Image (cartoon, rainbow, N blue to C red):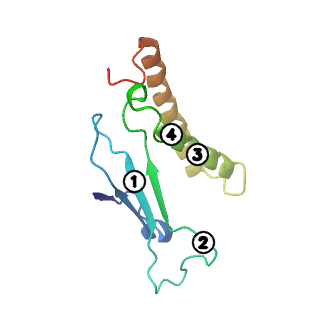
Amino acid sequence: MRTLTDHKLNGLNEALAITVLDDPGAGGACHKYSISLNVPPDDPIGIAPDSLRTHWEIDFQNGPIQEAKYNGLSGEALMAVLIDRLRSFQAGPYKCRENACALTHLEEALMWLQKRTRERLARGVEGTHKV
């Protein structure tokens, strides 16, 4: 297991601990992540009294779909959530240049991943370990 810290900058992100729960698979990527909200008892903000969750797990697809079947999320699905969230901020009172730049880069990242998938589909290797 290892811990990720790239997100740490402010109160909430400091309180969120991200742990990688598995070793990289055949493609070199990990598949299981845990995110825990760890608020120190003396934190003046604390956890919302009506909050039911302080722990989340993310399971990504593990193995080629044709062999392993559907068993997890895609990175593209999580990007779609982030894109929707930033588009919503941009349509409201939190519109800003920084959100616009982040949105553009997420949209571009999704476009490149979809391009890769389209090319794999065209070659007949999508859902397999074949390159």
Q: CA distance from mark 4 to mark 1?
A: 23 Å
Measured along the vertical axis of the image, is residue 13 above or below residue 114? below
Indicate the secondary structure of the residue bearing disc 3.
helix
Give the quadrant of the N terminus.
bottom left
Identify residue for label 2.
51
Where is residue 41 shown, x and y percent of the image? Answer: 46, 85
Where is residue 17 shown, x and y percent of the image? Answer: 40, 65
Q: CA distance from mark 3 to mark 4?
A: 14 Å
Q: Point out which mark residue 105 bears.
A: 4
Residue at image point 65% right, 45% down = 87
Q: CA distance from mark 3 to mark 1?
A: 17 Å
Where is residue 95 shown, x and y percent of the image? Answer: 66, 52
1 or 2: tag closer to the N-terminus: 1
Q: Nearer the viewer, mark 3 or mark 1?
A: 1
Where is residue 86 shown, x and y percent of the image? Answer: 61, 48
**Disc 1 residue type (three-letter):** Tyr
**Disc 4 residue type (three-letter):** His
2 or 3: tag closer to the N-terminus: 2
Task: Tell whether 104 sits left or right of 22.
Answer: right
Q: How many marks?
A: 4
Tag 3–tag 4 contact (CB < 8 Å) = no
> What crowding class fits label 2: few (fewer than 14 Cα within 10 Å), some (14-19), or many (20 or more)?
few
**Disc 2 residue type (three-letter):** Ser
Residue at image point 45% right, 51% down = 58
Give the quarter of the image for residue 83.
top right
Residue at image point 64% right, 75% down = 50
Identify residue for label 3.
81
Q: CA distance from mark 1 to mark 2?
A: 21 Å
